[in-house]
Amino acid sequence: MSAIQGKAAVAEPDRDCPLCPRLVAFREEWRAREPAWHNAPVPAFLPTGGPEAVQLLVVGLAPGLRGANRTGRPFTGDYAGDLLYATLNKYGFANDRFAARVDDGLELDGAAIVNGVRCVPPENKPTPAEINTCRQFLTPVIEGLPKLRAIVTLGRIAHDTTLRALGTKLKDAPFRHGGQYEIGALSLFSSYHCSRYNTNTGVLTTEMFEAVFAAVAERLKTA
């Protein structure tokens, strides 16, 4: 097991994690095709202060093939990161250094980002079994953030696997854009995923996405 980025003490899947045969085969295929890419489970991205500094956790779906799977950092290298990191910067959760590469100087402030599934799935579609298997890495991330107050889930898959990691029934906090639920000491906010498909089709606008994080920022002020 390796540590997550920043001053972390939460276990991450090994670079050659063998747990999901389909994802292993896809990973090996792309290691052969693009040996300079990351092509491995993508670790959580933490602020420089480490787990103790995290009040907000953003949970995504899985690495994009030419995004995080290539670069090794969540939401880095594809369009989804442009909107996510610009929004995090606007509400004080990141500095304004995002340039879609891991040496851009980007730092998070009080926030962390992790994917529900750590390896890139074919066609961006993990199977239910793969989602369930990878939850063993999501749960300890959540449990390893002692000052966590809010979680934003991006898309239904991220939302549902986060609820299961928290031991909450799906019917008690159904997915919807702009949803907000109180689960113990945590506030859970749900959003459509910030994918190019969703923004190009108008399913998600910048204003809709920013409204979720505005609500998070306001909640953390009053927590």
Image (tube, helix red, strand yellow):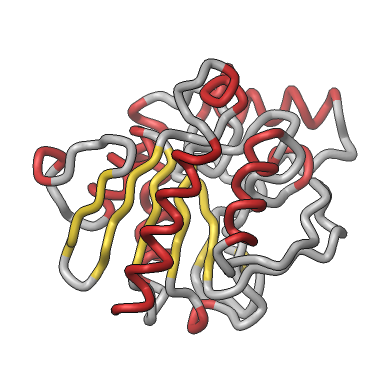
Q: Is residue 217 visible?
A: yes
Q: Is residue 129 left or right of residue 17?
A: left
- The percent coordinates of residue 135 (x first, y second) are 37, 48
- The percent coordinates of residue 82 (x first, y second) are 69, 42
Residue 183, quarter of picture:
bottom left
- The percent coordinates of residue 177 (x first, y second) are 33, 37
Q: Residue furthest front?
A: 207
State whether residue 184 is above or below residue 20: below
The residue at 50%/40% (across/down) is 207
The residue at 69%/29% (across/down) is 65
Q: Is residue 122 visible?
A: no
Residue 37, quarter of picture:
top right
**Quadrant for the C terminus in the image:** bottom left
Residue 69, quarter of picture:
top right
The residue at 87%/35% (across/down) is 35
State whether residue 213 is above or below residue 190: below
**Quadrant for the N terminus in the image:** bottom right
Judging depth in this view, the residue of 66 and 4 nearest the camera is 66
Q: How many marks?
A: 0
Q: Is residue 178 left or right of residue 18?
A: left
- The percent coordinates of residue 79 (x first, y second) are 69, 34
Judging depth in this view, the residue of 86 and 55 nearest the camera is 86
The residue at 56%/26% (across/down) is 199
